[in-house]
Amino acid sequence: MAGLGMRDIKRRIKSVKSTRQITKAMEMVASAKLRKTRGRLEESRPFTRAWKQAVLGFLGELQGTEHPLVTPRETIKKTGYIVIAGSRGLCGGYNTNVVKQAWEHMQEKKATCVVTVGQKSWEYFSRREVEVPRSFLGLAEVPDFIDAQEIRRFCLEKYQAGEVDEIYLVYTNFESTISYKPKVLKLIPLDEEALETCFHTDKSLMEEEQMRHEAAVKDDWELTIYEPSDAEVLGRVVPGYLDSMIYGGLMESAVSEQAARRVAMESATSNAEDMIDKLQLQYNRARQAAITQEIAEIVGGAEALK
């Protein structure tokens, strides 16, 4: 029995070592992808921040202008969501946290529909009988700006057609390699709530009161005249703002996913090493017990021959 136990332990040690090799390789791959996507994120953040600041100042100058993308609708019959999650697992609680954040926010709304980005987002909401008018499942791990434009075009068509009355973006904001939190950003209409969520999801922006003051207080020589009309300019500026916000959400989520996967695989590798140490100790004890038993049998047999 002792020999059989030792064989089982050796088999298990071999299995855990194989798993450790896989998790270590996945950790290295995730680290390489994290460096690549984080570099692109750092390049895109100034672009996204500039759009936020520009739109804030723009709306400050055009206060009171009536436009479908700015003016809230009197009755909110249906709310649309863009929920960004990953296409694969093995990344800790990354996917679970973002879809649960979206689900909790949706409970406050009367009727909802979800444009899912990523396989895990689609799987979560399709099981809950939520209306999913479209899914974006084939996005690369490093998203492109054209992906954000395609998502924006579809959602904006739904909004302008009156099928939804407001749209939120749910994504994971990357703060550091060990800190990434799901965020909810209101995209349209660009009302007070949308501006507040814009500030709350970006700590790098100036204080809200200061930005509002700078946007509202202008000298006479700084007055801007928009041609052909304020509404026409809004119709062209807001889609660009939406593109930048969606692209920023895609990039933040992509980096967060790789960081979460690297941490998860690092933890799995560490756990595998601990398990190997425990199994090795168990194997050594079983081996020592087997040797002791054999010695006892030999000594007992020698005594019986006397």
Image (cartoon, rainbow, N blue to C red):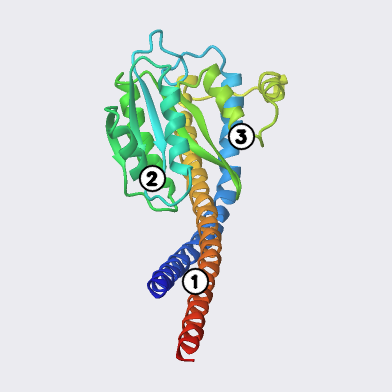
Bin the neighbour count of mark 1 within 10 Å (Cα to Cα): few under 14, some 14-19, many 20 and up: some
Residue 9 percent coordinates (x, y): 43, 69
* Image spot of residue 103 (x, y percent): 41, 27
Q: Is residue 293 visible?
A: yes
Label 3 environment density (alpha carbons within 10 Å; few <14, some 14–19, many ≥20) = some
Residue 33 left/right relative to 179: left
Q: Which residue is mark 2?
A: 147
Q: Which residue is mark 3?
A: 202
Q: Look at the picture and state if 226 lies above or below 84.
A: above
Q: Is residue 185 above or below residue 13?
A: above
Work out how far the residue at label 2 is from the one at label 3, CA to CA, in angstroms. 22 Å
Label 1 vs 3, first from the N-terminus: 3
- Could you tell me how far apart the alpha carbons at marks 1 and 3 are, in whole angstroms? 58 Å
Taking the view exactly as shown, the residue that stands out farthest to the bottom is 306
> Disc 2 residue type?
Asp
Is disc 2 surrounded by few (<14), some (14 to 19) or many (20+) residues within 10 Å?
Answer: some
x, y percent for residue 1? 38, 71
Question: Is residue 154 shown left or right of residue 27?
Answer: left
* Residue shown at the point (51%, 41%) measured from the top left: 248
Q: State the residue in front, 79 or 302.
A: 302
Residue that sits furthest to the front in the current view: 306
Answer yes or no: is residue 225 visible.
Answer: no
Sequence order check: which comes first, mark 2 or mark 3? Answer: 2
Residue pointed to by mark 1: 286
Look at discs 2 and 3 and give the one toward the viewer.
3
